[in-house]
Amino acid sequence: MRWGVGAALLVGGGALGRRATYRAAPTLLSDGVALGADGTVEVLPAGAGAVYVPGTRLPAQALGTAAGAGTPAGHEALAHAALARRAGARLAAGRWAELADGALCDLLALTGPTLAWPDASRPATVFPAGAVVAAPVGYWRYTWPRDASFGAVALGAVGLGDEALAVLDHLAALQLPDGSFAARYTHSGQVPDARPAQTDGVGWFLWAAGCLAGGTLAPQGVPTGAPQGASAVGAQSGAATLPGPTSQPGSAARSGAGAQSGSTTPGWGGRLVTALGRAAACLMTRTATPSHLPAASPDYWEVRERTLTLGTAAPVLMGLEAAHALARAGLDLGLEASALGERCSRVRQAVVRNYGPTWGRYPRTDAVDAAIALVGPPFMEALPGVGAVRATARARLGRHSGGLAPGSSWRDDGVSWTPETALMALSARGWGWQGETEELLAWLEAHRTASGALPEKVRPDGAPAGPAPLAWTDALVLLATC
C-alpha cells in the first residue's frame, strides 16, 4: 500500500471506519516495463501496450539507439541474456502458465534493474543486485523489506535460488544495527523520508529465510524422513508448498565459515547469517513485554497506528517461528533454539488471546482485513477460530468489480487492490479452496494492463490503476500458481 500526495488518511486504533473522502479516482501510472536497447528497464506509458520476446520483457521490436544494441545481433544478445537469467525456472503449466510467466518476467525486471525515469529527464537509476523495486514509477521506486521478502520467496519457489538469496543478501546490507528495518530504501540504501519504521519487515525477512532454507511457506523445519518441500501444515490442509532454492544452508552457514562477515557474496554465510541473528534478537527484544506482543507499528496499510494490528503481530510470530526453525536446523543465530521456541509459544498464545476469536485487524474487533490470510495455511497452521473467519473474508472484503479491498473497514470507494486479492488467492489455495483460488486468479489475469502487467489497483469500472507492474503482486501470483 503506497500513499502519494492527496492520499486519503486513515486513523488507526480506536477510529475504525473514519476515512477522508477527497481522494481522487486513481489513474494508471504506467502500463508496464520493457528492456531498452542498452538493457535499461524502460517505463511504458499508460495504454501503450507491448509485444515481447516470449519469456522476457524485451520488446519484439528493439527500443533505443545504443550503439550495437539496436542491431539484430544486439537485440538477440539481450534476449539471450534475459532468458539465461530465468533458466531452470519451474512455473505453473496449464491454465495459469501465461499469468505466471508474465509475473516472473516483471519480478525479474524489477529486481536489481537499471531503471529509467518515465520522462527521461534524469539519468537512469542503478539499483544493486537483489534490490526489489516495488514498482517503476513515482513513490514506488524504492525497496520495501516486505515486498522484497515476498520476492525472494517467490524466486526460490520457482527454482531461482541464487536470485532469491541475492534479495535476502541485499536486505541484510540494508538492516539497521538493532536488527530492524526502515520502511523503505532508495537505490543507494538511504532512508528517503521520516516515515516510521515497520516492525513487520523484521518478521518478513526471517520468514523469507526460513522458507528458502526449509522449502515451505510455513518454516517449521523438515522432520527427519520427510521429503524436502513437505508442507509443515500437512496434506489434509491442502497447504501450498514450494521447493527450496538451489543453495541450501550447510555447515559453512552454521558456523559462519566460508565467508567473512563483510562478504558481499550472496549465500548462507557471512553477512546474511549475521543479519538473521540480529533480526531474531530484535524480535526477541520487541516481544519481551508483559503482553509478549510488540508495540504498534505501521503495517502493509502504510499508515501510522496507535494500536497493534494483526498485520504486524502475525509477521512477528512468523519471523520468530522461522528463527526457531533455522536455529533447530543448526544455523548459528546467537540464540538458543529452546529460548526461541519458548518465545514462539508465548507470542502465539498472545496473538490468539488478543485477536481471537473474531480475528479483526485490531485486538478484540471483527473488522477483518487481508492479514487474516497470515494466521492460517500456507503461512502457519491455522490458529483457533481462524478458519470460520477466513471462510467469510472474501465476501467481507469484496468489491463489485470482483477484486478485494485491503480490509472491511477500508473506505468504500469501489477500488480493488491486487496485492490483497493475490494474497487471498494464495490463502485460498492453502486452505484447499480451489474454486476461490481460481476465481481470484482469473480476476487478476483479466485486469492486467495492455502490456500484460499486474497493476496495484483496479477501478470500479474494471480499469487498471496505479503503477504497473507491482512486484508484491507478481510475487504473490507466482506463489499462488507454483
Image (tube, helix red, strand yellow):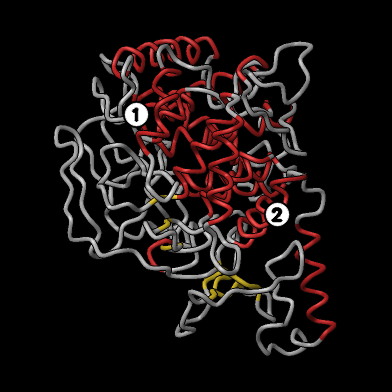
Q: Residue at x 33, y 14 (%)?
A: 357
Q: Is residue 282 left or right of residue 341?
A: left
Residue 288 in the image, given as x and y percentages of width and height: 33, 18
Which element is circle 2 on?
A: helix
Identify residue type, mark 2: Glu
- Give me the disc on residue 98: 2
- Give me the disc on residue 310: 1
Q: Nearer the viewer, residue 279 or 261?
A: 279
Crowdedness of circle 1 by 10 Å Cα count: few (<14), some, many (20+)? many
Q: Nearer the viewer, residue 12 or 31?
A: 31
Q: Nearer the viewer, residue 406 or 188?
A: 406
Identify residue type, mark 1: Leu
Image height check: is 335 above or below 423?
above
The number of numbered badges drawn on the structure is 2
| Disc 2 to disc 1, C-alpha distance | 34 Å
Q: Nearer the viewer, residue 448 or 275?
A: 448
**Which quadrant of the rendered structure holds the C terminus?**
top right
Could you tell me if the residues under marks 2 and 1 are in contact, i.e. CB atoms within 8 Å?
no
Which element is circle 1 on?
A: helix
